[in-house]
């Protein structure tokens, strides 16, 4: 969703008088909160399956027929929803049996050995180019906060001993995808302590649902006490505000790395079982650390062997990448 914000901005710029509705799942709605690009949000029915699909289509049919549906997702269900929802023109990529549901099949941008692997921002821009939109080549993501988000972030950080005289280091040690994406907590702690010593960074550990134990392990292993939060204490809006305040982020291949990109925060990404191609964004202030091992990318949620893709990334590599980003931010 964060990667798609560039496409939303482009659509609003090219269709300034249009009534734009976003059709999305409820859990991603906070990503686009306070953004100026849409007039309406239509949430996909939470029941899922055929019942949810038909209920969503029925909701779309209650509105005047949409003149254009732009399908950023590649799913069959999303194309069927807008077809049943009576959208007059339906533009997307003809993949996974969707051709008959579309009025316009935009050319798929994938080329080379594995044409399925294409950066998401390139997938979205190819649809915008098909429509003839100006600015389709600007992949820069953009997210927004409200004053209450900023205030909550300030309160939470202050309550946890935030030292305003020290730069903030965001540590994101989890990944909802699964254990295969995780770098060991002790290594995060080692890097955070080294940056506290060399750069006076104060670490804030940002964990998601079910990841509180990982944050506790990092805090226990660190010499320089980090800022941690209880599960559910930080809203998504406050998370955005905390990331925006950060001088550097170190993370696994997980969602908050894209928030860092949106706020122009340097970020070191530790990547193992997934391919860097799909999330590639040409962002100059990102360093992706990845070791070439025969079994990667496997996309398994749990490593069945020795987790070598992540274990071969050492704290020294991460520290060196962080120092280089900080010393040469536009390199």
Image (tube, rainbow, N blue to C red):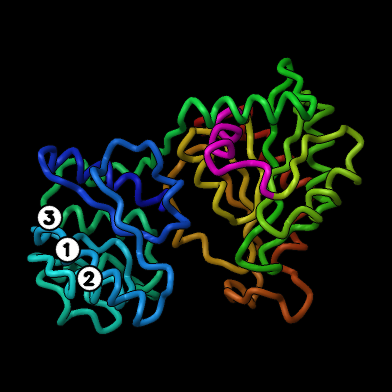
With 144 as the anchor, is 298 left or right in this view? Answer: right
Q: Marks 3/2: CA distance?
A: 27 Å
Residue 101, by quadrant, is bottom left
Residue indicated by mark 1: 62
Disc nearer the start of the sequence (1/3): 1
Q: Which residues are magenta?
A: 232-245
Q: Which mark is residue 191?
A: none
The residue lying at 37 percent from left, 64 percent from top is 118
Nearer the observer, 258 or 19: 19
Tag 3's secondary structure? Answer: loop
Residue indicated by mark 2: 58
Mark 2 crowd level (few <14, some 14–19, many ≥20, 10 Å Cα) = some
The residue lying at 73 percent from left, 56 percent from top is 211
Tag 1's secondary structure? Answer: helix
Vertical placement of residue 330 versus 218, above or below:
above
Q: Are marks 1 and 2 in contact (CB under 8 Å)?
A: yes
The residue lying at 48 percent from left, 38 percent from top is 284
């Amino acid at each position: 969703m964060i990667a798609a914000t560039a496409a939303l901005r482009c659509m609003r710029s090219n269709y300034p008088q249009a009534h734009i509705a976003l059709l999305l799942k409820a859990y991603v709605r906070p990503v686009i909160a306070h953004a100026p690009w849409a007039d309406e949000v239509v949430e996909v029915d939470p029941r899922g399956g055929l019942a949810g699909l038909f209920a969503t289509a029925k909701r779309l049919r209650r509105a005047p027929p949409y003149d254009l549906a732009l399908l950023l997702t590649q799913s069959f269900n999303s194309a069927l929803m807008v077809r049943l929802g009576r959208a007059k023109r339906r533009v997307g990529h003809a993949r996974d049996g969707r051709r008959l549901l579309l009025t316009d099949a935009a050319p798929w941008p994938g080329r080379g050995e594995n044409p399925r692997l294409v950066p998401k921002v390139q997938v979205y821009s190819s649809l915008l180019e098909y429509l003839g939109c100006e600015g389709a080549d600007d992949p820069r993501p953009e997210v927004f906060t409200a004053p209450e988000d900023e205030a909550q972030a300030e309160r939470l950080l202050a309550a946890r001993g935030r030292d305003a005289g020290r730069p903030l280091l965001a540590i994101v040690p989890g990944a909802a995808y699964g254990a295969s994406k995780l770098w060991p907590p002790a290594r995060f702690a080692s890097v955070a302590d080294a940056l506290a010593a060399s750069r006076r960074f104060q670490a804030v550990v940002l964990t998601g649902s079910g990841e509180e134990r990982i944050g506790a392990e990092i805090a226990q292993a660190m010499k320089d006490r980090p800022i941690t939060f209880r599960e559910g204490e930080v809203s998504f809006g406050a998370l955005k505000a905390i990331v925006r305040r950060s001088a550097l982020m170190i993370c696994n291949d997980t969602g908050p790395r894209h928030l860092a990109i949106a706020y122009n925060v340097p970020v070191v990404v530790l990547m193992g079982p997934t391919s860097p191609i799909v999330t590639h964004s040409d962002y100059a202030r990102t360093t992706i650390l990845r070791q070439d091992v025969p079994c990667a990318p496997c996309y398994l949620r749990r490593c069945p062997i020795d987790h070598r893709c992540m274990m071969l990334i050492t704290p020294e590599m991460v520290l060196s990448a962080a120092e280089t980003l900080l010393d040469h931010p536009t390199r």
